[in-house]
Each structure stands twice: as C-alpha cells, then as structure tokens.
Image: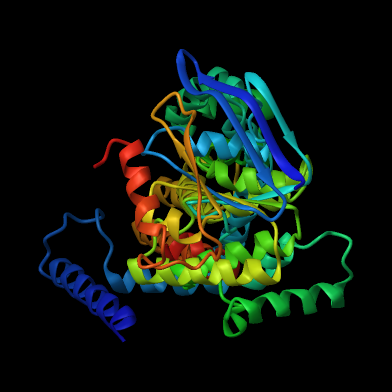
Amino acid sequence: MTAVLELKGVGFDYGALSVIDSLDLTVAKNELVVCVGPSGCGKSTLLSLLGGHLAPMRGTIDRRGQSRTIYQAGGLFPWLTVRQNIARGLPEKLAGSAQASKVGEWLEIMRLADFGDHYPHQLSGGMRQRVEIARALAAETDILLMDEPFSALDYQSRNRMRRELVATLVERPRAVVFVTHDIEEAVQIADRVVVLGTRPANVRRVLELPPGRSRSPATPGVAEAEQAIMDELGMS
Amino acid sequence: MQRFLFPALVGLAVLAIWWGAYAAGMFPVGTVPSPVEVALAFKSELASGRLVDDTIASLYRVAWGFVTAVLAAVPLGLVVGRHAGTRAALLPWINFFRSLSPIAWIPFAIIWFGIGDLPAIFILFIATFFQVVLATAAAAAAVPRVYYRVAEELGLRGHHVLFQITLPAILPQLVTALRVAIGVAWMVVVAAEMIAVRSGLGFLIVDARNGLRMDLVVCGMITIGGIGIVLDILFSRLSRIRSLRWGFEQ
C-alpha cells in the first residue's frame, strides 16, 4: 500500500508549550483516517502540519501529493458566489467552458444546482459545508484534510453530511485525514481511528474498523471500538 | 411611506415652530431670519447662479481632498493592518494625528499652500486620510486567517492574495469607513473654505455673516445639510452591491 502521508517523530511547540510530541502516523492512498482526541489536544495543529501550513520543529513529514483542507470555521470566500467558490478549487489550466461544466457537475453532485448564484451567507450550514467539500474535491488533489468540518451542524445534518461525504469518496477516492472530538463520528466513517492523547499529542492507540464506511451503532465492532476509544481517553 | 412621510412631518413641524416663534417676536432683531427671508435668499442665490457655483466649488474641493486621501490611505492601511511591525511603529502616530482636528492644520495649510483651492484641499485630505488608514488597517488585521490558508492551498501568491483575498474581504468595512469619512470631509469643507478662498459654501456663510445676512447663512446651512444627506445616501448605496452584501447581512 502506497503511503501519501508519513510522519516520523513529529513535534511542535507553541513557545514553551509542547502541543505535539513524537507523533508517528502513516496514511495510505485513499484511506480515511480519523484522528480523535479531547478538545485542545493539538488536532488543528496536526492538520496545519499535514497541510504544510506549519513546519514541524522535530521529526519529518513526507507528503506525496497536494492537499486541500476543509475548515471548521468555514473557509468559503463570502464575496464569491457558490459557483465562483467551487471554480476557485478547479485546476487553473481549465478553459472557460470546461470549467463551467465541471462546476455544474459539482453543483449537481452536491445537490446545489439551484444555488450556484447564491452567496455563502444565504445558505444553511449544511449547504455551506457541501460547497466546501465540492471546492476541496474539485481540485482533485491526493489528500483531503478535514478539521471538525461538521461540528457546527445540527445532529441530523451532521449524520447526513457524513453519509454524503462517504458516498462522494466512493466515486472520487482520495486519502482523507479527518479530525474530530466526536467518537461516534469517528467510528461511523473511519477505515482507521487514531486516538490522540492530551497535550502534547501523540498516538495513544490505533483501531482498525470493519470494512464499509457508513456504519451504524449496530454494526458489529462499532460499539466495541467506541468503548475502546472512551477507555483510552479515560471517559468511561 | 414612513421613510419619507415621517421626516417630512418633522420638517414641517420645525418650520411651523420657527415661523411661529419669529411671528411672535421671540428672536431679537437680526439674530434669526424668517422662513420667508430664507426662501427669498434661496431664490435670489439660485437666480444669480452663485449658490450653484459655490456648491460646485465645495464639491470639487471635497472630491480632490477625499479621493487623494483614500488613494493614499488604503495602501498604507493595508500595510499597517497586515504587517505587525509596521502596525506597532505607526499605529500610535496615526491615532495621534487622527485625534487632531483638521482645523488645527489651517495655519500650516496657509503657510505651505498659500491661497486658492490647495489649502482647503489639504485640510480635507487630512480630515479623510487618518480615519481611512485606521479603518483599513483594522479591517485588514481582522481578515480571518482561514482565507489566507485556503488561498495558499489554491496557489495564490503575492499581489493575487492582495487583490483576490485581502481587498474583497475588507471591502464592506471599507465602504462603511468611506461613508463616515465623506460625511466628515463634507462637514470640514465649511471650515476649510473659511480660509484663503473666495468661493464655496463655507465662504458663502462667512461672507454672509460679514454682511450680517443671516438669511444667506441659513440658506448656506440648508444647502450643506441637504448635500450631506445626498452624499450619505450615495455612499450607503454602495453597500447594496451584490458581492458586498455578505458584509452587511451576516
């Protein structure tokens, strides 16, 4: 299996505060890895390192391919329409008509065909996240990084968005690193769950989940995985 | 309906009180003109073309002072807002000069620029410049970092980041700042024209006061207030631009 991301002994400090220490992690091509950990354990810093926005102070990060990030706070440009935002994600070399049809395709996939000319502030939270996902996937990069992308959504929208993400990845596979503090979310969609310890973050445990990414609490192995993560985080 | 009717009713009420007080002899002679005198002053000033000429002269100076100040202030504000070192060095001084009334610059304006339009334009420049620098810097410093992260991933570099991220991100706040700044500039024009020029609405008022023509003073005041409202409406229209609506509706 080819690795697209390989972290060896990675460490990062903010001044005297060690946020990440001796972190080893490998993400294979088209794998969906979910990192769970308590709030403030350095998950967002980890994503910034993976995206190349921060350089590790210790250790090495080997990134084979380009990445796009979907942010918790929402990274859509509010001054651009949905259509223009998605178009920004496309490779630059695409000619005008090819670009328009690609954007149209993504609007269809994300069920946003009637909202292409809307601005982000005119959409619901779930729709905004769908635009973010479309923009990030439209780039056709090898790696997708997601920073608690659904945490601002209500329970139902969150569930629906997880299913939609998984379905979209079936058609357009790529390596995904998804960070969340939501254990249920982690065990529902991940191929592998990486449990991070409290600051400084390092890998406490790695759990392989049974195949199939749209799991319910009744799926065999899910309850056990959830319990194992809670035990690891000292929550049970 | 309410937008026009209510202000019109208040205007009529003020006019009625003014007229009633005047008719009742409540004002000492020569201190407050009657509405009729003001109306006649308007008529004669319009007929002679002086009111229009003075209005154009004032707008011309405000336009020059305002536009040159904005052109200089926005780039400086962007640097101050985006560069922490520059911000630390310059922000106290920008605040210092912003706190100085533009009127305090009048002696320098006359010594440096003599008589004519230039000293007045200089005063208007000062009145606009520091507040626009400050507003631009505050807006640029507050652009969410996530936009720059996304821009980096999209491969935007250098001036593309400035024109495609920073500027559109600060535009709504900039429009609000410009709306405030044009109001201040228009307010200051009267003072600026009380020096070294022989035209403009400010000069009209000073000249009328020297001739004890309080009817003309009021005529000038009403014109200034009216144009102030028109300028404000024009600038507030900018906030209706579709790609700026997000900044006003969020």
Residue A22, image x and y in percent? 56, 22
Name the residue: 49% across, 15% down: A15
Q: Is residue A64 left or right of residue B184?
A: right
Q: Is residue A227 left or right of residue B56?
A: left
> Which quadrant, please, contains the N terminus of chain B?
bottom left
Residue B20, image x and y in percent? 14, 72
Name the residue: 36% across, 62% down: B215
Name the residue: 68% across, 62% down: A137
Query: Is any atom of residue B234 visible in this view?
Result: no
Name the residue: 60% across, 48% down: B147
Query: Is any atom of residue A54 visible in this view?
Result: yes
A149 and B59: which one is in front?
Answer: A149
Residue B189, image x and y in percent? 51, 46
Residue B180, image x and y in percent? 46, 51
> Which quadrant, please, contains the C terminus of chain B?
bottom left
Above or below, A8 against B216 in this view is above
- The image quadrant that residue B57 belongs to is bottom right
